[in-house]
Structures are given as C-alpha cells and as structure tokens.
Amino acid sequence: MLLINTSLSKRDPNSFYLSGVDAEHGLLAVPAYGKPFLAVPGFEYERMRLVSRVGVVKLKKRSWKKQFGKKLGKSKVIGINKDMLSLREFSRIKKEFDKSRFKDFAKDLKMIRSVKTKEELQKIKKACRITDVILQRCIRKLKGFRSEKDVALYLETETRKHGCGLAFPPIVASGMHAGFPHHDPTSGKLLNGFCIIDFGVKYQGYCSDITRTVFLGRCSNRQMALYEKVLRVQTKAITLCKAGVRASDIFSFAEKELGKEFTHGLGHGIGVEIHEGPNLGPLSKEVLKDGMVFTVEPGVYSKKYGIRIEDDVYLVNGKCKVLTKTSKKLIIV
Amino acid sequence: MLLINTSLSKRDPNSFYLSGVDAEHGLLAVPAYGKPFLAVPGFEYERMRLVSRVGVVKLKKRSWKKQFGKKLGKSKVIGINKDMLSLREFSRIKKEFDKSRFKDFAKDLKMIRSVKTKEELQKIKKACRITDVILQRCIRKLKGFRSEKDVALYLETETRKHGCGLAFPPIVASGMHAGFPHHDPTSGKLLNGFCIIDFGVKYQGYCSDITRTVFLGRCSNRQMALYEKVLRVQTKAITLCKAGVRASDIFSFAEKELGKEFTHGLGHGIGVEIHEGPNLGPLSKEVLKDGMVFTVEPGVYSKKYGIRIEDDVYLVNGKCKVLTKTSKKLIIV
C-alpha cells in the first residue's frame, strides 16, 4: 500500500494527480491489491464523494492501522514519498504500522508523472492556448500599462476570466529588474530596456509556462544582437530535445553558448505542478522520453538587463513539438 | 543553529516569518550565537539582498557543513522543524552534519508565532479592515451576481485592486452547497437559502479570515431562529475567549450548544499562514494568551443547508477584541 498526503492539513500534488481532487484534508491510499481510495474527515466526505475519481471513505477516529490495516493484505510493505513526508508524519505512520517496512516511492512517482497521458497532454495544450491568447493581448496593450504590477494584474484578471487559476504569480521585470530571474513586479513606472514577462495558467489543474522578452524604448544594434543570440540558442535547444537524449546535455549546449550570464536551469517539466520532472539542469540524470512535457527557457542576466525566452514543448514519436505559439520576434514597444 | 527551509525549492512560512522574504530557494539559518542569515543560489542573491530583513549569503556548491559549519561554534545541536522537514531533506542534513545532534523546534516555532508582535497585529488589523470593506460591498451587490464563481471572482479582483493577495480561495456556498464547510464555488445559478461567504486577504504577508452567512429568497421563522442560534453561540464564544482559558473549553461550549451539526473546529490562529496556532479544537492543549490572534467560527451543516459566522479576534489585557466589523445581522437578499 502506498500512502500519500498523510499530513491531513496540506495539499499534495501527487494526491491530485492520482485522485483528481485537490483534497487538503484527504489521505490517499493505493493498496497493492485493490482500488485506491481517499480517506477524509467527516465534514469533507459528501463534497469529496461528488468530485473524486477514486472511492472515498470517512476517516474514523480509531487508528489508521485498524481502519486500513486489512487493505495491506499479506504485504508488510508501505510505500511512502520521502520528498513530501515530514518527519512528524513519518513518526505517526511508523507508530501506526509498527510491523511494516517502508519503501520510498518518490522517484517512481516523479517518473510516472513526468510522462503524460493523452488526457493530461490535452489539458496542458489547452492551458498553453489560453496563455498564448492572454499574453499576446497583453503585449499588444503593453504601452497602456504604467507599472509592472499593472501588467501582472491584467494577466491575473484575464486568467480568472478564462476560468483558470495562475500557475504561479506572473513575473514582469523591466529595465534592470529583468536581471533578476524571479523578480516580483513593482508599482513604479515601467523601466526602459528589455522587459521579461513570464506567465502561466492552470487549466483543470494543469500548468502552462511561457516567457517572452519585449523591448521598451530604443533598442540598439548590440541589444538586438544579444536578443537574437538567446533566441538562436533557444530554437537550437528545442531541436536538440529528442527521445533518448540526456537532459543535462541540452543544458550543457545552452551553457556553452551563453556562458556565465546564463544563471539558472534550462527547463523543467510541467504538469499538475509548475516544476516537476524532467529537470533540464546540469545535475539532471534524466533521459528524455516520449510523453514528456517541459519548458525550454535559456536566458542571460546581468546587473543592467535580462533576456529570457521560454516555450513549452512535448515529445512525440521521438521528436519535439512546441505547444506555445506566441511569436518570438523581438517586439519593440 | 536552527535550519529552516532546507528544501531549496519550496516556500516555508517560518522563513518568511523570520526573514521577511518569501524565498522559495532560500535556506534560513539562525545560529545560536550571531545573526540569522539567508543562504540563496547565485541567481537570487541580488534580489534577496534588496528585500531581506536578515543578512544574505550566496549558497556555494560545496557542502553546507563547510560553508556554515563555523556558525555552529562549539554547539553540536542543530534545530530542525519536524513539521516541515521532509525525510529527503533530513537525510541530507544528517549526512552534512554527521557529528551533530538534532532537536525538534516545531513546537517552539508554533508557540512563538501564535503570539503576535505589535507590527504583526497592525498588519492583521489592516488586512481585516480591507476584508470588511470588500465583503460589505460584495454583500450589497449580491443580487447582481449570477453564480457562486462570479461572487468569488469579484472578491478576488477587489482583493488585487487593494494591492493584496488572497489568504485562501474564497468559499461561496449557496443552498445545499452551504452544507459543505469547504465548498468550491460553482458556475451554476446561485441557489436560494443560506449562502456562506468565507473570505480573507493577505496584506504584507498577513492573513485575515471572515465568514458571513446571508439568505437568498424567503426566510422562514425556523430558518431565522437557526441563524440566531448560531449567532448567539458565536457571540457568547467570543466573550469566553480570555487569557488563561483553555482553547478546548471554548470549543466544548460551542459543541454542547450546537450538537452534531457542528462538524469542524471552532477556530484557528491566523498570521503568516491562514491556519496556525492556537487551535480551538477538541484536542487542543493550548491555553489562550495575550497577543494571540484567531478566528471564532461556529457553524451548523446538514445535507440541505449550512450556516457559519466567523470573526477574527485578538487578546489584549486578558480580554478579547474583535477585529472584523462587518454586521452579523442576517441579511436577506
């Protein structure tokens, strides 16, 4: 039996992934033999029954072992997720199932989640389409916004109007702020220079993630050449993404081309979380596979400026298809 | 030395509480002697230096022990938070600091956080004022909304316009939906009967949390009496909140008055998290103290209806002051 989200007071993306509901108070059990089920406190029972893809039972006050012990069958092994399980929760599980052995399923869960089903891919595609529409409108209107916060608020409001949530708080970074890869939008006037807009929505629980860099003010030839360089690296990196290729090799290509100004990873999987497997970083041991959906987002950052270009891609029949369609030609506002 | 947020890829409210920044990638270290500091990856260094209340250093690639070991001084004890620390993170810490002993600081952190400083109280007060303004406007406009989702979107949009974030996704539950304490707003037409609106904002990182129940359609005498009963219990429960009183005793009072239809806890602390200490539930061992800020939110729930009334209160000079001011007279729309 695999136990997921045993804290009973926080959400676990793995639980959403497997049950279809984002149950804050639900423990998800996946017996080795038999069907998975969600165990929730009484006050959540009726609501969860209406929305869950798996069976729902009421959590009783007696011990978990007494309530679920039978589902273990003869097996003494309980699967846990060491990436999520806190020391506190593990103490409780160890006490409850004192005769069991515990096996870490974190890697397995990560691997399973990194390869998307058709239904998952459809949801991510839809999220990408909505993101493209909103971002393109935003860029067309960019002249009308006063501050980074105004741009971010527009993106957020449009997202809600499309019936989606945000995949993460939008990053809008103008002028020297673009030099901070994870800048928080400010309420001052938009600064001249490169302006990074990094934005994604959550559609039916699935994330998109796109970045475009536009230019505010007069763009010099040197600046244009720098943008073109990042774009060339991004386009080339995408063509390198194929089934069977090591994720770290694609990172290394980008790092070699962009040098020290490229200060973060090249990309990450997207799905029910905005960051999941595969990881396109220097230490990644993952090999790209059909069904994986991830970002390709090289960038350069200095104290004065920043440029990042990011698309979402997926692998099918060994090759890479791009899901985000917003033009990458440098727009000068 | 106390280590907080060692995962380097998730946010930890304790880190925000102590450093003033919500650093996803920051490890916070609080040496037993010397000042606390945030250790962040290179690409976050410049940004964090601008916003952090504590010193910031770059995380180096070498081991944490080599980088921070000196800060330990002669002490061999490393404080950890068992509520947050995952088994994976703990494996790393144990390996890095193989000569250390580990002590759980979860309870201490929880206790410290449950008693608010003046500055924290000011922020929560401001959050409550903004929440009152938005909720009162929303209730006045209620006739104009079609669905629960429309109401929730209004609350969210107004929150953003006030420069705040949401403390949690608003609950708008009409008709039989009000019977689910944590209902997710739907896009169907608002249903007649009691309608629960549970809503809170985050102002400078601090949460508010208020619930009002209004009535849509014609309200019978029986329904009015039921509402009055919950209101009586809520008002009385607030007068019982005094320094030195056991939190569980106040829960017991409400449970005795409302019986089986009262299916969740009576209240919870609010602060940098929407749920923190003290817990006003049956199993709580906490004793109320001056400086605590928490919700008082009795309710009744059945398959057909639900009623909940919730205020935020704080204790000063032993007594209870109410922070949320929206009228509790039943509004019939």
Image (tube, coloured by chain):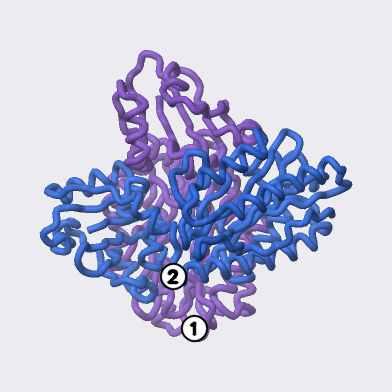
Chain colours: A purple, B blue
Q: Residue at x 77, y 46 (%)?
A: B194
Q: Would you name the residue on which mark 1 appears?
A: A192
Let me know if residue A329 appears in the view: no
Q: Chain of mark 2?
A: A
Between residues B89 and A68, which one lies in front from this camera angle? A68
Q: Secondary structure at mark 2?
A: loop
Q: Secondary structure at mark 1?
A: loop
Q: Would you name the residue on which mark 2 appears?
A: A183
B172 relative to A143, above or below: above
Q: Position of residue A23 (x, y in %)?
A: 54, 40
Tally of marks: 2
The residues bearing labels 2 and 1 have C-alpha atoms spaced at a distance of: 16 Å
Crowding near the residue tagged with mark 2, few <14, some 14–19, many ≥20 C-alpha atoms within 10 Å: some
Q: Quadrant of the N terminus of chain B?
A: bottom left
Crowding near the residue tagged with mark 1, few <14, some 14–19, many ≥20 C-alpha atoms within 10 Å: some
B261 relative to A274, above or below: above
Q: Position of residue B322 (x, y in %)?
A: 61, 62
Q: Quadrant of the C terminus of chain B?
A: bottom right
Q: Nearer the viewer, mark 2 or mark 1?
A: 2
Between residues B92 and B241, which one lies in front from this camera angle? B241
